[in-house]
Image (cartoon, rainbow, N blue to C red):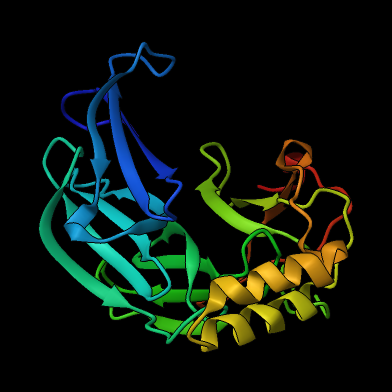
Amino acid sequence: MRHCFTRQYVCWLKVMHPDDTQKSTVLVADSLLGPYRMVRTNLRPLGMSAGDFDLAVDPVDGKGYYYFERVHSEMICADLTEDYTNVTGYYSTHFPHPHPPFVREAPAYFRRGPLHYLFTSGTTGYFPNASEVAVAKTYHGPWTVLGDPHPDDDSRTSYRSQICSVFNHPHKKDLYIALADRWLGDRDVDARKAAGMFETAFASDHPREHFERYERETPEIFAAPDTSAAGYVWLPVRFDGDMAYFDWHDEWCIEDYE
């Protein structure tokens, strides 16, 4: 993101470590294309293991916010420091769940008029699952979950994708576009079965042992994905009152919108 006052670009990265901990690296640059220099490494925001995240900047006062999954627990909204390179220590907690696949991750924040929106997914690794959309009047909530934004998706896999970003088209009246990762590419797996296996594993005291067994007994599901073959889904957001929806389009044109 670009700092409203310094005009510097600030980049946050999530880094996975061999011991399964997740830490953050923060970089800054004077140009979007760099060069970037690291200003923080091995950062554990608020002393937490921070998973998938999104960043937001208030368009009026320039204040920054950091939404992230507190791994396998809940969603955190943390205030950023003035330079956007750390957290201040003030935060709020949202959407608590006991364990995956129910824990919410992959927050995708956007604002429409006075309302703040978050799309989130469940926690099933690279397997797609049902999304949720939540709405609030402030960055820190309280957030109200409105439901699954994919009403026509009987597979409950968000059209086999995971929403990662939403942006307002700068030259259209009210067009919001969502990007979603298809981590498995064209590979077809039983995502519902995978979600059930995640639930069984994390409800136990030894989830790692369950996943080791899954990999041995069901390699057709738990074979390591080739993320280099992952693709994207781009869809417009449809609004009905406060609710945000996605309808499937094999193809669509920006020119069709005012």
Q: Is residue 206 above or below residue 78?
A: below
- In the picture, measured across the screen, residue 154 lies left or right of residue 78, that is right
Q: Is residue 249 visible?
A: yes
**Res 239 quadrant in image:** bottom right
Front residue of 136 and 154: 154
- In the picture, measured across the screen, residue 42 lies left or right of residue 220, that is left
Front residue of 181 and 196: 196
Front residue of 223 and 144: 223
Question: Looking at the image, which residue is at 33% across and 78% down?
Answer: 94
x and y, in percent, of residue 5 in the image? 16, 29
Question: Looking at the image, which residue is at 89% across and 53% down?
Answer: 250
Front residue of 243 and 225: 225
Question: Looking at the image, which residue is at 82% across and 77% down?
Answer: 155
Question: Looking at the image, which residue is at 69% across and 80% down?
Answer: 197
- In the picture, measured across the screen, residue 182 lies left or right of residue 83, that is right
Q: Is residue 131 visible?
A: no
Indicate the quadrant containing the N terminus: top left, top right, bottom left or bottom right: top left
- In the picture, measured across the screen, residue 207 lies left or right of residue 10, that is right
x and y, in percent, of residue 144 in the image? 40, 84
Give the number of callouts: 0
x and y, in percent, of residue 84 in the image? 20, 39
x and y, in percent, of residue 205 in the image? 48, 85
**Res 228 quadrant in image:** top right
**Res 11 quadrant in image:** top left
